[in-house]
Amino acid sequence: MLGIVGGIGPLAGADLYRKIVEHTLAETDQEHLPVILASIPHEIADRTSFLLGRITENPAPALAKVITTLQKAGAQTIGIACNTAHAPEIFDPMLRLLQQNGNAPRLIHMIDETIQAIQLHPTPLQRVGVLSTSGTYHTRLYPSRLESAGLTPVLLSLERHEALSQRAIYEIKRHPENVPEEGLNRLNNALEELKTLGAEAVILGCTELGMIESRLKTLGLAVFNPNVILARAMISATYPHKLKP
């Protein structure tokens, strides 16, 4: 059984579940995969606020609690539907808490899977742009992994990141049912700037960005949506025969 840590933001887990359904080989309802989604947003502190030092509460214990709940419900393979939650400052203490409690969940790491997907792309890529929250930006979550893989991260300046990517992400969080046109324009400007800086590809490094991928002007850039990548990796890890080509 697959388990999804949701609630971070609330629609991110639902989006990951949708992606699992969309990438599963199935002709009938009964042929789809068993999935448990736990969305407990009120217990999980804002990841970006913690990473930027605006609050002191680390989301790690709450995330560990949700994972334990999923395990007790029968989930064998678990994915966390949030890029920022994978920052080492959150992810590592979460793992330690699980290990201290005798839990060894099969966690699929969204960031590692995304880097691997870039490396396996049929067209060799070198310069990879990143759009993300400020928490992910400041912890260099994607740039560090890209560099370790021999790839070159392409980033907006801090000022442009805050004005375009971060601002748009929180507009999407506030208005998921009707994304403001200004937010879309900011993201499209960000993509244009990344391409001007030499990016050949872009990581939509926040689940909110992946949810509006079809509305973005990607300008010929290879696009990597971590929620899609995570969904496929979760299916492959547990039900490989059910993964769509």
Image (cartoon, rainbow, N blue to C red):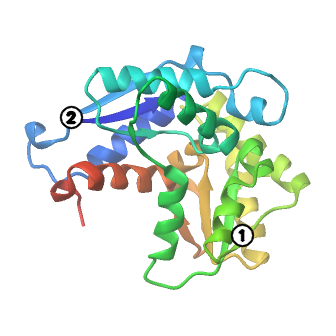
Q: Which residue is situated farthest in the right direction here? A: 159
Left or right for 188, reference 163: left
Q: Identity of the amino acid at label 2?
A: Pro
**Place of residue 91 in the rendered image (x, y in percent of width and height, measured from the top left):** 60, 39
Q: Identity of the amino acid at label 1?
A: Pro
Residue 188 visible from this viewpoint: yes
For the point 84% across and 47% down, the residue is 162
| Number of residues whose C-alpha sits closer than 10 Å to that of mark 2, classed few (under 14), some (14–19) or many (20 or more) | few
Pick the residue in front: 172 or 225.
225
- What residue is disc 1 on? 153
For the point 55% across and 44% down, the residue is 207
Vertical relation: 32 (above or below) 93: below
Provide the secondary structure element on which disc 1 rests: strand
**Place of residue 22 in the rendered image (x, y in percent of width and height, measured from the top left):** 29, 49
Report which quarter residue 166 is drawn in: top right
Mark number displayed over residue 34: 2
For the point 41% across and 23% down, the residue is 68
Left or right for 57, reference 201: right
Q: Earlier in the sequence, mark 1 or mark 2?
A: 2
